Image (tube, grey):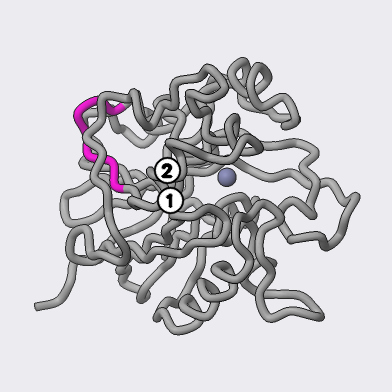
Amino acid sequence: MNKPTYTIKPLYLGEMTRYEKSMHTFTFDYGVKMHSPYLAFLVQGDGKNILVDTGPKNLEVIKRYHSHVEADVPPEVHLLKVLEKHGLKPEDIDFIICTHLHWDHCQNNDCFPSKKVYTQKREVLYAINPVELHWYTYESPQCGLTPVWASAGTKLVVLDGDEEIIPGIEVFLTPGHTPGSQCVRVNTEDGYYLIAGDTVNIYENWEGNAKYHHVPAGIHVDLREYEETFKKMDKIDFKVILPGHDMKVLEHSVYPY
Ligand SMILES: [Zn+2]
């Protein structure tokens, strides 16, 4: 039986306005500043509306706890407003997949109470007890915060490795950027598309540069694992990759286009 096919809509949820490029591309191009969007992805097909990541909450929260980020997040690009423009209410969302649990990928999970949120066991275990340097990145209790992913009232579904969530929607464990990052492979009429999360921040991470085949994100926990992840991804069948923070993703409002 043929698997169902889906479309993917990238959702613009604000941006980092002067982001240090080398934070995306290991140490390369230090000093170059770039616009870098916060993104979620709306995957639709077979009667389902699926969200991949939920983005940041608002500028106030970013400025209070993530002040290193120069950001522009106007209220009209909050996830719920953006979904409304697509004719969707929170209850219309069937389930959420979080590529990882950094704050900018899961801060609106609480807008979807009782919905399933798929994430990796390794990510949850790390998010509960990260190194001090990552306390704010995970908004962990160690810095006095309550992480939204843990308090959202959602049904956390903890995965242990690669898995097909429903026919045509699969996740692949891709550690490196974080211990339990995952990519989401979506079956489309044009073949498989891979929503990469921050395993691939911008296209350059995947396409490489003059020196390296692939380039890890500047923010990473384990370069050996990251390299193994890239080797694994080289073997995964997909036609198009969609990075987690690249403006170019927004050149098309829907994939395949
Ligand atoms: Zn991110």
Marks 2, 1: nearer the viewer = 1
State the residue at coordinates (60%, 71%): 224
Q: Amino acid at mark 2?
A: Asp
138 w.r.t. 257: above or below: above
Which quadrant of the view contains residue 176? Answer: bottom right
- Residue under pointer 2: 53
Mark drawn on residue 99: 1
Which quadrant of the view contains residue 24? Answer: bottom right
State the residue at coordinates (19%, 28%): 114
Residue 30 forms part of the magenta stretch: no
Describe residue 219's horizontal placement relative to residue 28 as left or right.
left
* Lower sequence index among marks 2 and 1: 2
Magenta segment boundaries in residue numbering = 112-118
Describe residue 132's horizontal placement relative to residue 47 as left or right.
right
156 w.r.t. 79: above or below: below
Specify few, some or many for label 2: CA neighbours under 10 Å numbering under 14, 14-19, or 20 or more.
Answer: many
Residue 135 percent location from the top left of the image: 58, 32
Q: Secondary structure at mark 1?
A: loop
Q: Separation of disc 2 and disc 1 at Cα?
A: 6 Å
* 36 vs 24, nearest the viewer: 24
* 34 vs 138, nearest the viewer: 138
Residue sitting farthest toward the right: 31
* Mark 2 touches mark 1? (CB < 8 Å): yes
Residue sitting farthest toward the bottom: 235
Residue 223 percent location from the top left of the image: 63, 66
